[in-house]
Image (cartoon, rainbow, N blue to C red):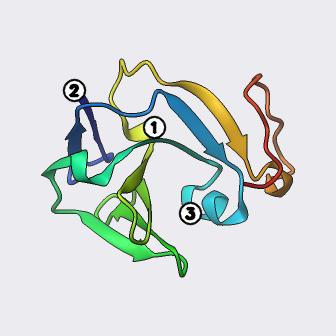
Amino acid sequence: MVTGQCECGAVAFEVAQVRSEVTFCHCSQCRRMSGHLWASTHAAFSAVTFTRDDGLTWFKSSEWAERGFCNICGSSLFYRETGKDDLGIAAGCVNTPNRLMPGKHIFVADKGDYYQIADDAPQIQKN
């Protein structure tokens, strides 16, 4: 069982399995929403059980997606495309040990100019 939570614990979840590869998104929207880059694993939304959701709020961040965050501590937790069962789960909120590993970098053409990508994961200019 994989578990995770926001900083204050007002949002907590469990899911039997998540994708082991982490996707790093460098697009400007993800950078603004997360404060740097968005690093996420994935699971089926229908497979996730929220063991606590008092702080969970969904923000429609575009015509095609929404983002879940804690309205108490502000933790950025989830990304979900409208009408899809996939759920992007912030890798940083997944409790350890979790066996997650770098998978790929996307929207590298939009990355911030203040950092370098230092791992060997594939880099995709757009997605």
In this rendering, the answer to whether 66 lies above or below 73 is below
Q: Residues within 10 Å of mark 2 (few under 14, many from 20)?
A: few
Looking at the image, which is closer to me, 17 or 120?
17
Q: In the drawing, does residue 122 fall left or right of residue 34?
A: right
Looking at the image, which is closer to me, 106 or 56?
106
Q: In the drawing, does residue 104 fall left or right of residue 21?
A: right
Q: Residues within 10 Å of mark 3 (few under 14, many from 20)?
A: some
Residue 101: x %, y % from top left:
55, 23
Which residue is identified by label 1?
A: 92
Which residue is identified by label 3?
A: 33
Which residue is identified by label 2?
A: 1
Q: Amino acid at mark 2?
A: Met
| Image quadrant in which the C terminus is located | bottom right
The answer to which image quadrant residue 28 occupies is bottom right
Residues under numbered marks 2 and 3 in contact, where contact means CB atoms less than 8 Å apart: no
Q: Nearer the viewer, mark 2 or mark 3?
A: 2
Q: Amino acid at mark 3?
A: Met
Secondary structure of the residue carrying tag 3 is: helix
One can see residue 43 in this view: yes
Secondary structure of the residue carrying tag 2 is: loop
Q: Which of disc 1 and disc 3 is earlier in sequence?
A: 3
Residue at 20 percent of width and 54 percent of height: 10
Q: CA distance from mark 2 to mark 1?
A: 16 Å
Q: CA distance from mark 2 to mark 3?
A: 28 Å
Residue at 28 percent of width and 63 percent of height: 72
